[in-house]
Image (cartoon, grey):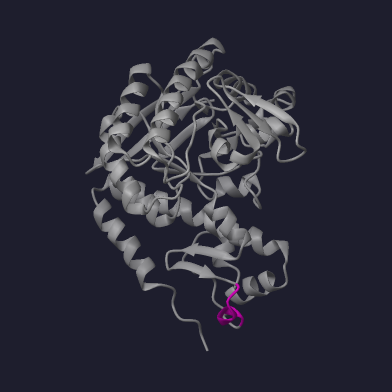
Amino acid sequence: MSGSFAFSVLHTDGKARRGQITTPHGLVQTPAFMPVGTTGTVKAMYTDQVRETGADVVLGNVYHLMLRPTAERVARLGGLHTFMRWPHTILTDSGGFQIMSLGALRKLNEDGVTFKSHVDGSKHYLSPERSMEIQGLLGSDIQMQLDECLKLPAERSEVIRAMELSARWAARSKARFEELGGPQKGQGLYGIVQGGTDIELRLKSAELLTDIGFWGYSVGGLAVGEPQHEMLAVLDDTCPALPEDKPRYLMGVGTPDDLVKSVAHGIDMFDCVMPTRAGRHATAYTRFGKINLKNARHADDPRPLDEESSCPATRDYSRAYLHHLVKSNESLSGMLITWNNIAYYQDLMRGARDAIATGQYNDYLAACTDGWERGDIPAVG
């Protein structure tokens, strides 16, 4: 156990920051990518493998865990760290994303949201207070306020309504977090900046949240339909409006290109289902770009995905074998390609941290982009 929540910036290079978060279950080196373990598992991976890739923190989700196995059951079994055998840092999302993604299955009002379970149709109520109670039962180190995430584009009046509602829910979330003793347990609570791509609304949201005061700040409601340049423009104005001594988390983002460019705008933390989902659908992320292992060009290719990688899945299995597993619908294909993808994302963040520490982040960004643009080395034969 490492101690109470704390954050320190160790190096800067332009707006990019190399930092460290202290939590009750360990240190998180930033910039950090958090593999998504929605239901208490990073899909198709063992927790030991996840850790060996270099991950310091994984993410769980309130909505899914409250449905099954329930937060109360997880608490009785020792908390989420014990339950999923991950003795390191855990961040839990509040269920706010499901307000958007499960829009047809929920009813929203000022007090909270009622979901119709996508599993069995049963009804479940989630308020800011209940979300904090669930996160407390799970025992996560970093917890998130309940917010409303909108799909973009949306009418400005709707963006204003959702942003203001999220700010009111932020205050309620913090009050309940403190009542439950989160600060005394060393846990941290993040507020979530909303406002779509409207800079005025983003700055207003940032002001409201900093007035409330949080242990960290997230930028939510991006990568939900807007182009990358609009996302980066939001970050360019929003990050400077957030406290410099608190971590900044860009939620649900994204591609390797999104990550390295967002780091350059001052983001410290990321999560996304993309590397695990892509792995289960035969797409490998590498320093050469994306490789579609369904493609017949790999059928006779004896090379690994990247012979210089330290990840066994990347270094020790041929593209021909991975292609064979994919075409044969073998579950091992998803396991190996997901392992590669999570390892690549962690390598990408490790490289970013090293580059920031040595004042070479612009060169690192250019080298990454150049590698992706060059593409994969042509297949043999």
Q: Find residue 367 and report its image quarter.
A: bottom left
Pick out the residue farthest to the right: 120
Percent x, y of residue 318? 59, 73
Percent x, y of residue 360? 25, 52
Q: What residue is at 61 percent from the left and 77 percent from the top?
A: 320
Reply above or below: 96 against 292.
Answer: above
Q: Which of the two residues, 49 or 189, is positioned nearer the viewer here? A: 189
Asked whether residue 76 appears in the rendered view, the answer is: yes
Q: What residue is at 46 percent from the left and 33 percent from the top?
A: 27
Reply above or below: 17 against 136.
Answer: below
Q: Is residue 381 magenta?
A: no
* Span of residues in magenta: 294-299
Figure disc tally: 0
Q: What residue is at 31 percent from the left and 42 percent from the top?
A: 234
Pick out the residue farthest to the top: 179
Percent x, y of residue 345? 47, 53
Q: Which of the two residues, 20 or 187, is positioned nearer the viewer here? A: 187
Side of 260 where 346 appears, left or right: right
Q: Find residue 119 and report its image quarter.
A: top right
Q: Which of the two residues, 49 or 75, is positioned nearer the viewer here? A: 75
> In the picture, which quadrant includes the N terminus?
top right
Asked whether residue 245 appears in the rendered view, the answer is: no
Q: What residue is at 56 percent from the left and 19 percent from the top?
A: 111
Side of 149 where 321 appears, left or right: right
Q: Find residue 84 and report its image quarter.
A: top right
Percent x, y of residue 222? 42, 43
Side of 292 where 362 appears, left or right: left
Side of 46 where 177 appears, left or right: left
Reply above or below: 79 against 172.
Answer: below
